[in-house]
Amino acid sequence: MRKFLVILDDSRECLNAIRFATLRAAHTGAGVQILSVIPPEEFQHWIGVADIMREEARERIEAHFEVFAKWMRDKHGLDPELVIREGEPVDEILAQIRDDEEIGVLVLGAGAEKSGPGPLVSQLSRASGSLPVPMTIVPGDLSKNRLEQIT
């Protein structure tokens, strides 16, 4: 089954990316895989402290994911898959795409701030010519109604 890969992070624009991926998957019979990456700088402490911080980060991600997963199941009949990786975000996104052959589209949310679309969109856009899958960039300030119209 083809999957839409969407990134779960603390950005506001991530919500629109998840909505878009969910609606497209529901309309096309695809699945949704949600990837969250824990950056290495979160664990620059003693081993015991790093292990506790790592576990807390995973628990926070799983709780955040469950909110979206419930909405996907209840409203759209989709059962999303959660993947948590540790490392540099762009490297881990590319590794996940390489590791899972069913991923057909990478979906990213773009920030609407004057500072630009965000680091993931900026970095992955520069590499877009060599990505192994198409990338869809969803504007962060796109309304829910407009998202439903275009998906």
Image (cartoon, helix red, strand yellow):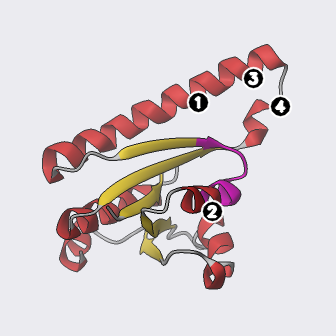
Residue 88 lies in the magenta-colored region: yes
| Residue 88 place in picture, x, y as percent | 72, 52
Residue 31 lies in the magenta-colored region: no
Mark 2 crowd level (few <14, some 14–19, many ≥20, 10 Å Cα): some
Q: How far apart are the two marked residues, 1 and 4, measured between alpha carbons?
A: 14 Å
Magenta residues span 85-94
Q: Is residue 108 above or below residue 83?
A: below
Tag 4 secondary structure:
loop
Instruction: Give whichever of 54, 31 is nearer the camera.
Output: 31
The quadrant of the rendering that contains the N terminus is bottom left
Q: How far apart are the two marked residues, 3 and 4, measured between alpha carbons?
A: 7 Å
Please state which amino acid type lies under the numbered disc 3.
Ala
What residue is pinned by disc 1?
A: 57
| Residue 59 place in picture, x, y as percent | 50, 26
Mark before the other along the chain sequence, 3 or 1: 3
Please state which amino acid type lies under the numbered disc 1.
Ala
Q: What is the number of the mark on residue 50?
A: 3
Q: What is the number of the mark on residue 44?
A: 4
Please give the name of the residue rendered at 68% of the width and 80% of the height, measured from the top-left corner. Answer: 126
Q: Is residue 41 left or right of residue 64?
A: right
Q: How far apart are the two marked residues, 2 and 4, measured between alpha carbons?
A: 24 Å
Mark before the other along the chain sequence, 2 or 3: 3
Mark 3 crowd level (few <14, some 14–19, many ≥20, 10 Å Cα): some
Please state which amino acid type lies under the numbered disc 2.
Leu
| Residue 18 place in picture, x, y as percent | 36, 57
